[in-house]
Amino acid sequence: MRRLALQVEDHSIEFGAFEGVIPKGQYGAGSIEIWDSGNYVLHEWTEQRIEVTLEGSRIAGRYVMTRFRRKGEREWLLWRKDS
């Protein structure tokens, strides 16, 4: 199954452990929860394609992202690669 992934602005590393609520009216408003954590192994990183193996506690496997130019400059398609 393919998913649309949206590129956003870089965030400070301190936000990597943030959980809580961002008030309505502020950028990113809503409830923030860390859903998974772990490591990754990078296989390829080009302007058009990124391929990694995720080693999370809830999600693991090899994943690919490719640019989805029909939708815009900051949109990517993400899917799990079968082996």
Image (spheres, rainbow, N blue to C red):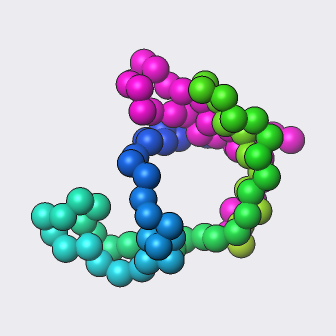
Task: State the image coordinates of residue 74 (x, y, percent, origin top left).
Answer: 42, 33
Residue 22 sits above or below residue 27 on the image = below
Residue 37 sits above or below residue 41 on the image = below
| Quadrant assignment, res 7 | top left
Residue shown at 55%/34% (left/top)?
Answer: 77
Residue shown at 33%/74% (left/top)?
Answer: 31
Is residue 2 at least partly visible in the picture? no
| Quadrant assignment, res 63 | top right
Is residue 15 at least partly visible in the picture? yes
Q: Single out the residue that lies furthest toward the top.
A: 70
Q: Single out the residue that lies furthest toward the right.
A: 83
Residue shown at 64%/40% (left/top)?
Answer: 79
Q: How many marks?
A: 0
The span picked out in magenta is 58-83
**Is residue 70 covered in magenta?**
yes
**Is residue 60 covered in magenta?**
yes
Task: State the image coordinates of residue 66 (x, y, percent, origin top left).
Answer: 60, 29
Position of the N terminus by quadrant: top right
Q: Is residue 7 left or right of residue 25?
A: right
Task: State the image coordinates of residue 10 (x, y, percent, origin top left).
Answer: 43, 52
Q: Is residue 28 left or right of residue 13?
A: left
Q: Nearer the viewer, residue 59 or 41?
A: 41
Residue 33 sits above or below residue 6 on the image = below
Q: Nearer the viewer, residue 59 or 1?
A: 59
Residue shown at 38%/25% (left/top)?
Answer: 72
Task: State the image coordinates of residue 56 (x, y, percent, origin top left).
Answer: 71, 66
Position of the C terminus by quadrant: top right
